[in-house]
Amino acid sequence: MRDLRDSSDVLRDTRELRDRLAEDGYLFLPGVLDAAEVTAVQAELRTALHGIGWLAEPGKLAVADRGLGFTTESFRTVYPAVLRLESVHRLAFTPVLWALMRRLLGGEIFCHPARVVRLAVPSADPGRYATRAHQDYVVQHVTTDAVTAWIPFTACDPDKQGLRLIPGSQRRGFLPTDPSLGGRRPLYLPVPPEDPAWATADFAPGDLVIFHSLTVHGGGPNTGDELRMSADVRYQLLDEPLRAEFAHPHGWPVTPDWDELAAGWTTDEWYRLDERVRLVPMPEGVDYGTYLAGLTPPPSRLLAPARETG
Ligand SMILES: O=C(O)CCC(=O)C(=O)O
């Protein structure tokens, strides 16, 4: 598999970062976050997952049962235990990340309250993605220039793989999904795990990957016996709209809403949306696949060559 291009050398050069995001569809910034802060969140996640019987011991990542799987039911039974952790959400606002997103997006920004915590369980099958190939636009719909911060909480290696993406794929626009993948919501693309276009890295806590909503990506196989954990956190400009469901926790309404998850937090800042954010509900009564087939992404400012837009 190809290696991701390390952009740490141009971290302070906003124009070059934007050019690389436009050209490659992503930015890989190893060690840019505070590894101690990320590892502290990992420790809280481990304690929570041990508490609900997913991890054998709170101090280790070994799963309690090799037959574990994250299913629709897990949004009710497993997910609240991790989404309830304030530190997971606070991390999305950590100053280094916020300042970087503000520079990249070039204006007033907000962070989507719906934050994904990926719990990639082991599977002996090396051909089984932890997360199948997709573009985030397949759920974002109303804004093209939403960018995702992918934050590994645990180290990744060829046995416990993390994020993978296809450099340059954002230039191909919004791609047709495969109706046979993903059930009622056909979100996924027919890209095999062995496709030579994939690129990845051996990530460590403190690393960060930022990618565009049209960049094809997924999560690689986890064939070890440990859980791989990471977060997907999304940011966009304040004056661009947001699909209304992303104001709620990821997985809502199966996952409980903020009144329950955030009870006892120190602040509502991590999920309260600025009143200027325009929420756009999903049209009712439409078949998801038909809806996607008729969808055209609004023009992207971020993917226009950075030299032209200044
Ligand atoms: O961590 C993963 O498995 C994939 C991440 C992902 O799909 C995303 O950030 O949208």
Image: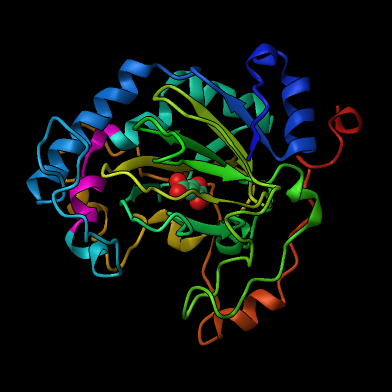
Which quadrant holds residue 99? Answer: top right
Which quadrant holds residue 173? Answer: bottom right
Q: Which image quadrant: the C terminus?
A: top right
Of 52 and 239, nearer the camera is 52
Q: Position of residue 88 (x, y in %)?
A: 31, 36
Q: Residue at x 32, y 20 (%)?
A: 37
Task: Please tell me whether the stretch drawn in magenta is mainly helix, strand or loop.
Answer: helix
Q: Residue at x 51, y 87 (%)?
A: 285
**Image side of residue 309 versus residue 235, left or right:** right
Any part of residue 60 in sight: yes
Q: Position of residue 13 (x, y in %)?
A: 72, 14
**Image side of residue 249 versus residue 280, left or right:** left
Question: Which range is magenta?
Answer: 78-87
Eyeballing the image, is 246 above or below 304?
below
Eyeballing the image, is 142 above or below 21?
below
Q: Which image quadrant: the N terminus?
A: top right
